Structures are given as C-alpha cells and as structure tokens.
Image (cartoon, rainbow, N blue to C red):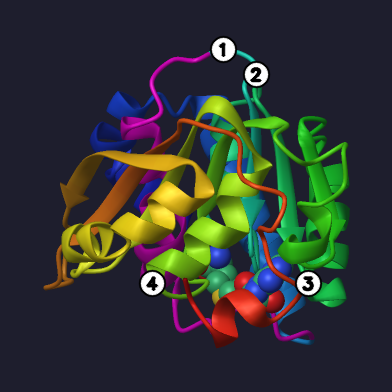
Amino acid sequence: LAALFEKERPRLEPLGVSAEATSRLIAFLEKLKAWNAHTNLISFTDDEELFWSHAVDSLMVLSLAGAAASARAIDVGTGGGFPGMPIALARPDWRVTLLDSVGKKVDFLRAAASELGAANVDALSGRAEELARLPEHRASYDLAFCRAVGNFSVVLELTLPFLKTGGALLAHRGEDGPDEAGAAASALTLLGGAFRNNFSYRLPHRDKTRHILRVEKTAPTPDAYPRRAGMPAKRPL
Ligand code: SAH
C-alpha cells in the first residue's frame, strides 16, 4: 500500500492530500485489512483494489468540495468508512460523522479513529431515517457524502434531511449518474434539493466512468421525510 501511495503521489497532491494525511490513510487501510480478516467489513480482494476503488475513489470528492474551511460533514451508509474516512483524514479541519446501521462497522471505525488520533471523526451507529429526525442531526451539516447505498432517489431521501439550506450532497454514482439526476427531478423538488453539477472521472484499469453528483440543499426538507426506516428503499420517491 505504501508503495502504491508513493507511486501515485502526483494524483493525490492536486486533491490536497498531504504527506501526513497519506501516512494516516495507509495506517487506516492496514487496520481495515487486519479487522476484515476476522470481521466482515468490506469485500476485500487486494491492495490495488483497496487503493483505487476505496481510497482514491473516496478522495475524488475533494475535487468538488472546494476549500470550505471547518465544514461539518456526514457520510451516510459509510460501511468500512468510505468515502468518509479518507476524506476526514485528508481534511482534519472538517468534522466528519460516519454513520452506518451495522454496529460492528461502527465499532471498527470508532476504534480506528481513536488509534489514529483522528479527533475530527465521530462514528455513529443507527439508521439514517431515524438519525435525520433528531434535532442535533437534522439540517445540521454543510456536506453529505454517500456511496453505494441505493438508487439515487433513496440516497436523496437519506441524505438531504441532514443538510442545512445552502449545504451540498456529493454523491458517488456509477456510469448512469447523469441520467439518474434527471430521473430524480421530482424527488429533488420534494426534498428541497437542486442538482448543480457532475464531476466525471475514470480510475486506471477500470473501464467504467464514475461520477460524483453535486446537489445543493435549496429549501428545508418537509417533516414527512425521510419516511420510516426501510420505506425509502422499499418505495423510492
Ligand atoms: N459507503 C460504503 C459502504 C456501502 S455498502 C462504500 O462505498 O464502500 C452500504 C452500507 O450502507 C452498508 O454498510 C449498510 O449497513 C449501510 N446502510 C444502508 N442503509 C442504511 C440506512 N438506512 N441507514 C444507515 N446505514 C445504512
């Protein structure tokens, strides 16, 4: 892993990933591999895959996020910590909440954050549908991230309630990303969001184009959303 990071330095530097952040990120990925050997956190294949599809893919968010200092951010359905943990390590000035409904994943993230001394990370277990109704979380974040959690309107319902008006969702999507933004037009209006732009990229040795969609929170989300746990995925808006 360290060799891969060294070799790909020119790709990481423009994203603002410091040498210090890089060494913490390597330490995080090594911990993830070690835990994953006994607790199922991610489907791990090899270091190349971990580097490109998890670390670098996560960090691509930084190409859209601008330099906004001291943002409060939430990663909804973070799993083994993606994209939230690499972002948090690269941006120690942001406060990043990593949310997942699976307790053992959150236990790992909490332990890893503490061992790495990542004081800007909070790991939280629970369902987005429930957390987004609590006053300390609702309309409280400047940024939301979400990767591989469901179809785009599910992602919108699970993330937009967390954002302050003026905040932004930076959502990883696969090759159909731009079409999904169009198809979710009515969900966007309903939830108080507006599609702003799309960042497209490719990762080496992978043939499919990836996208990060930026959605701005333009109005408060009505109280009816998110619907009760399970409903967003069962009956997407
Ligand atoms: N974002 C990670 C993990 C994707 S797998 C990555 O890209 O690698 C989807 C994750 O979302 C799982 O860990 C699952 O537990 C979590 N999840 C799904 N629905 C959720 C919900 N409603 N609230 C919180 N977490 C959820």
Q: Secondary structure at mark 2?
A: loop
Quick one: label 2, few (<14), some, or many (20+) residues within 10 Å? some
- Looking at the image, residue 219 sits to the left or right of residue 76; the answer is left
Which of the two discs, 1 and 4, sits closer to the camera? 1
Cα–Cα gap, marks 1 and 3: 29 Å
Residue behind label 2 places its C-beta within 8 angstroms of ligand 1: no
| Nearer the observer, 78 or 158 | 158
Quick one: label 1, few (<14), some, or many (20+) residues within 10 Å? few
Q: Residue at x 88, y 65 (%)?
A: 107
Q: Earlier in the sequence, mark 4 or mark 2?
A: 4
| Nearer the observer, 112 or 6 | 112
| Residue 132 can be seen in this image | yes
State the count of labels: 4
Under mark 3, the amino acid is Ser
Q: Residue at x 52, y 37 (%)?
A: 22
Instruction: Please say whether residue 133 is one of the residues in the magenta stretch.
Output: no
Q: Residue at x 18, y 71 (%)?
A: 206
Cα–Cα gap, marks 2 and 1: 6 Å
Residue corresponding to mark 4: 49
Residue corresponding to mark 1: 69
* Span of residues in magenta: 39-68
Which of the two discs, 1 and 3, sits closer to the camera? 3
Residue behind label 3 places its C-beta within 8 angstroms of ligand 1: yes
Q: Are marks 2 and 1 in contact (CB under 8 Å)?
A: yes
Examine the rendered structure and indicate whether residue 37 appears above or below residue 56: below
Q: Which mark is residue 93?
A: 2
| Residue 203 can be seen in this image | no
Cα–Cα gap, marks 3 and 2: 26 Å
Quick one: label 4, few (<14), some, or many (20+) residues within 10 Å? few
Under mark 2, the amino acid is Asp
Residue corresponding to mark 3: 101
